[in-house]
Structure formats: structure tokens, C-alpha cells
Amino acid sequence: MRNSFVMIGVSLVVFGMSCLAAPRAVAQDQQDQSKAPTYTMPEYNAFQACRAETNAQARAKCLDDFVTKFPNSTLMLYVNQLYFATYNELKNYPKTIEYADKLVALGDKIDSGTAVQTLYLRSLAFNASFNDKAPDAVDQLNKERAAALMAIDILSKIAKPANVPDDQFAAQKKMLTVFFNYMAGFTSSDPNVKDYASAIKYFKAGLAADPNDTVTNYKLGLAYLLSTPPQSLDGFWALARAIDLKVTDAPKIQDYLRKQILAYEQPGCDNLADAQLNELLQLAANAPDRPATYTIPSVDDLDKIRKASNIITVLTDLKAGSDKAKMTWLAICGLEFPEVVGKVIDVAPGTDSVELHLATGATPEEIQAATAANLDVKVVGQPEASRVQKDDGVRFSGTLVSYDPDPAFMLHWDKAKVNPEDIPAEKTGKHAPHKVAPKNPGN
């Protein structure tokens, strides 16, 4: 994702920096005519010959010759500027960075616009050449971060040229602010550095200037998730923002986000994360920052519900609706419940399974009084279960797979097995309903 951000800024240095300030150029007629030049004519002519050279390789050789002949020349500032531009043209990125550092080290000997442009091109050279496996990777990252922070400081103080419209200056300054904060954040969050707290600070500073920058939102989300401990909810929100804003590889990032949500809460049924993801994407599309009221339950939250759940608490919580029902369903969907008690309302034998419609309640009396089913139980691999009849009491174990909310409330079970003790023998005559009266029908 690093290169994606850099490409956004390519036009900026061509169009934007020209309005902030132009690099200094050396010319004899720009000198104060009341003072003698501080360089000799041979120095001046040699430098101008290098400036006039259109072939970058030949220009670099010309500059090398100049330095050999005039190592202490007062024109060295301009020589270094030309070296910097030449190596950038040649895509010799280590040399581009070397001469960028030499130039900005001169402080107020170069103007603010030149410094910002130099630091911008330095960042592009860094992006094009950085190898995180290099022995000096940490040193490279720290130097690039220092350069980005220097650029941010200069930008905060740079004055608008009188001939540049306010809106144009503000827009270009904003883009550069986002870019350099991104670079400070990127170098802080690199696996060699892992300063995620600083990365979050810099990414957020960039988003304060432009909340809709796609790559910064993406990198902010990763920094949150990689922090110790992870700031999961904020990370989810930032990644959702990036996806909404059509970040590069959005489908892959969306799949990654879904997996992170699953790992964070570990719901009973993986497909429940899809609804949460869709809701998150809808909410994040219109809000740069996560509202304090938005949350996703953690695995610890769901485990507490699981430990306290039985069939009666499940019925009560799911019928309650709203957030309580959502939390409970996240926790118990896909769980296997043992010894669930119910009264048979009807039986539907099938080829490979038997479907039982049962009624359950909080007490044996409530179960026996029920006339409508609230459990839909698919019994698999137990064809003899078809022998149970209306009003029989049965105990079964099964996996809870879905539910229908009120007004037609129904819990759906799969892969169920009926306690063999509750299955009557082969039909031999009139059937007397089998009653089950467990000590605790809520278990």
C-alpha cells in the first residue's frame, strides 16, 4: 500500500510545490552588484556548464569534476542542489536521499519551499528503494520519519505567496500535510520499528487534514489492530472507512476485516459476522470517527453469556429482542445443547431425517399445557425417532442453528438425537403419551 499513496502525490510536486516556493538558482546577475562575487569566474563557468548539460549521466560526471577542482567553492549549495536533481532524474535513490539530507541540513540557507520539495522527493526516493530486510532498515526508517516530521514542521509555518489564491494554497498544503503524516506513520508502524502509538498519532493527524484519504485510513486500522493490546474496535472502524472509500484491494481488505471480527468475538456461527460487517460498513461510510456507542462484543463477553445460558434463558433473551437478543444469539448460535426437554406437537418423518415440532417451557406444567411448538428439531440418523407421538415428552441433544423471532417464535435445531429411553417400542396398539418430568427442565 506504500506505493499507492506515493502515486497520489506525484502530480502534487509538479503542480503544488511551484506555488509554495521555487528552488534557488544561481546566476551572476542575481548577485548584489555592490559586492564582489565570492567565487571565481572559472568556478562559475564550470558550474554553469554542468547546469547546461541535458544528459543526466554526463551532468553527474561534470559535477564530480567540479567538486574535484573546487572542493571549497562557495557555489557548493547550488552544486548539491543540482546533484540532488540529477540523481533523482537518474533514479539513483540512495544518492537522491544522501543529497536531500545534505540540502535540508543547511537550515535557513535554503528557503522553505525548496526544503519541502526536497523532503517530498526524498520520501519518494525512500518509497522506491526501501528494503525492510536491509541491515540498516531501522536507521533508514528513523531518518525518513525525522525528514517527514521536519517537513510537517516547515509546512505549519510556511507563508502563502502573495500571487497564489488562498484556496489553491490551502488545498496543496493539505495534501502535503497528509502525505508527510502518512510517511511518519508508515515508518513508525514498520515491523522493524513497531511504534504503533506514534503511528496512530501521525495517521490521525493526516486524517484531521483529510478524513477521506483511503490509504491513511487503511494504515490507521492496521496500526490499531497491531497495537499491544489491540485497539480492535477503532481498528475495525478505520478499515471499514478505507473499504467504503474504495481503497486499493478493497475486497481483500474486507475479507481480512471479516476474519479479524471473527477472531475478536468468536461467535457460535461464522455467518453472523457478515451482518456485523455490513452494518459496520454502512455506519463507517458516514462517520470518520467511531462513535462511543458503537461496539462489537468480545469473545469474553460472549463466553459469559454461554456459561450462564440454558434453554430457558435462551428463550427469554431471544424473545426480548433488541441488543439483548443479538448478543445472546451471537453467543449461542451453533452450540450443542444436551437434554433439552419438550412435548411433541407433531412428527414429520422423512427419508433421511425425522422432524419433530416440540413445545418447551420453564416448568413441567408449562410444557404440558403448551399447544404450539417453539422448537423445530431435525433428528438425523435415528429413524426410530419417528415413533414418538403427539403429547409425548422427549429429551434430545442437538445443535442450535437458527431462530425465528416473535410473533412466530421458533428455535431450529440440527443433528439432533432423541434420548432412546423416550422412544416408544414398535406400535402394537393404543398409545399412551410418554411423560418426561426432569428435575430441571431448563438444563
Image (spheres, rainbow, N blue to C red):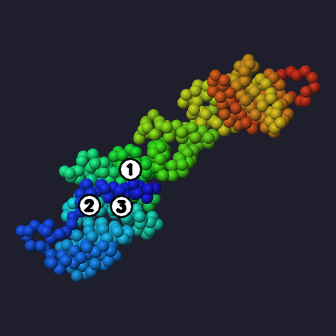
Question: Of the residues shown, which amino acid type is indicated by label 3?
Answer: Ser
Task: Answer whether labels 2 and 1 touch (C-beta < 8 Å).
Answer: no
Quarter occupied by the C terminus: top right
Which residue is pictured at 56% across the width and 48% down the height?
255
Label 3: which residue?
Answer: 123
Q: For the residue carrying disc 1, how many other residues have a C-alpha within 10 Å: few (<14), some (14-19), or many (20+)? A: many
Disc 2 is placed on an element classified as helix
Which residue is pictured at 73% across the width and 19% down the height?
370
Disc 1 is placed on an element classified as helix
Question: Of the residues shown, which amino acid type is indicated by label 2?
Answer: Ala
Q: For the residue carrying disc 2, how many other residues have a C-alpha within 10 Å: few (<14), some (14-19), or many (20+)? A: many
* Picture disc at residue 115: 2
Q: In the image, is 100 to the left or to the right of 34?
A: right
**Residue 53 seen by the camera:** yes
Q: Return the x and y of residue 249 as percentages of the image width and height.
A: 51, 52
* Picture disc at residue 203: 1
Name the image quarter holding residue 54: bottom left
